[in-house]
Image (cartoon, grey):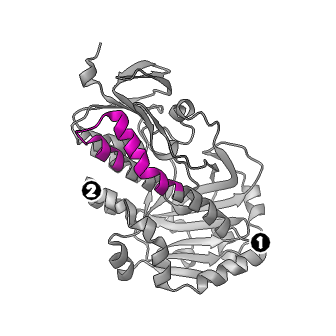
Amino acid sequence: MENKQELPILIAGGGIGGFATALCLCRQGRQVRLFEQAPEIKEIGAGIQIGPNAFYIFERLGLTAAVLAKASLPQTLKMMDGITGEEVTSIPLDDAFLKRFTHPYALIHRADLHRIFVDACAGLPGLEVITGVKVRGYTDLGDSVIVHSDQGDHTGSALIGADGLWSAVRSQLIGDGAPRVSGHIAYRAVLPTADVPEDLRSNSMTLWAGAKTHLVQYPLRNGELFNLVAVFHSDKYVEGWDTHGDPEELKFRFRDAAPPVKALLQKIDSWRMWVLCDRDPIKNWSSGNVTLLGDAAHPMLQYMAQGACMAMEDAVVLAEEMGRSDTSIADAFVRYQDRRYMRTGKVQMSARLYGEFYHAAGVNRELRNQFLQARTESQTLDSMAWLYNGI
C-alpha cells in the first residue's frame, strides 16, 4: 500500500498536453505517473502551426532552441481565393511582427514537437510513464484518487485527464456525451518537398479558401517536407479519425478549385482522413481532485491553429496553481480552470467562426475578400494581439 503523502499525480494521456504537464509538475519536485493507451510513446499526425503565444511557453520551459531546431519559420501568412486564385491578404512575419509579439510564428511536425517534450521529460526524477494502459474511469476518495484501467487500478493524489477529444475522464466528470460533429472533413498528407513542383512551393503558410472547402500548404523540417491539409464539408461521416480517405470524393469536393489547388491535390497518393469535432465551451471542468486539460477540457476545431498551444498553456497555468504552498489540490484545480475557461472558450468559438469565414461562398465570399483586402497590416496585427500576446 502506497503512503498517501507520497502518492503521485496521475495523468491520463501521453500527448503533447500530458507530457507538458508532466514536465511542469516534475520540475516542481512532484511524483507523476503518466498513462498512455498506445503500446509505445509516439505521436501521429502531420504539421501543426505554433503562434507566438506558444513560444512564451517554450521560453518558460527552456525549450525554445529545441523547437527552433525542428521548426520552419515562414515568411508570410497568406490567404488566397481558392476559386479565382487571387491573393486575398498576406501578413508579413517580419521585424514588425516580431516587434509586436516578441516571438515568431512557426510550423512544425506534430511528432517533432511531441518528441521535444518526451525528451525533456526523459530521466526526470519522479516521472513514471506506463504505456499500453487505457484509463476507463476513476473514484475520487477525497484524499486520493483511484484510476480504473484495463490493466488494473492505480492510486494517486489527483487525476489530470489529458486524454483528448474522446476523454474517458471527461465522460465521467462532465457526462456531456459525444463531441459535436462539425460536418467538416480534413485530409492530411506530408510529402517530400522535392516531389512538389517548384512553382507550387513557397516559404509561406498559405490557405486557399474555397466554397465550403480550403487547402492549407506549408513547409516542415526546414523545408525538407511539404504539409498539405484539405478540408471540405460533408455529412457522409459521423465520427472517426486517422482513416484512409476517398480520393474520388476529395476530387469532387474541389472540382471548382483554382489550378494550383488541383495541382497540389494531385501530388498526393495517400491521404489520412479526420472527421473534425469540437464541443461547446464549459466553465467547470474540475471536481475535487480531478481536472481536465487540453482537448479533454476544451476541444476545438483547427481553424485557429491553437489546439496544441492551448494544451501547453494549460499545463503551465495548472502547474503554477499547484505550486502555491497555501492551497489544496482541489482549490488549485478550480483556480486553474477559472484562469483558463474564458480564453480557451474564446478560441473554441473563434475557431468555429473562422471555419465559416474560410469556407464562405457566393456573395459572402466576395464580402470576405473585400473586408480582408481593405485591412491594413497594423489592423491585422491588432486583431491577433489577444491571442498571440500569450498568458
Where, quadrant-wise, is the C terminus in this rendering?
A: bottom left
- What separation in Å lies between label 2 and label 1 (alpha carbons)? 46 Å
Residue occupying the point 56% across, 52% down: 300
103 vs 380: above or below? above
Q: In terms of secondary structure, what is the magenta stretch mainly?
A: helix
Identified by mark 2, the residue type is: Arg
Magenta stretch, residue numbers: 317-345
Q: Is residue 267 visible?
A: no
User: Where in the figure is residue 149, as x and y percent of width and height?
Assistant: 48, 22
Find disc 1 in the rendering and name its residue.
256
Label 2 vs label 1, nearer the camera: 2
Which image quadrant is residue 80 in? bottom right
User: Where in the figure is residue 222, as x and y percent of width and height?
Assistant: 39, 66
Which image quadrant is residue 85 in? bottom right
First in residue order: circle 2 vs circle 1: 2
Q: Quick check: 323 left or right of 207?
A: left
Residue occupying the point 44% across, 53% down: 310
Identified by mark 1, the residue type is: Asp
Find disc 2 in the rendering and name its residue.
60
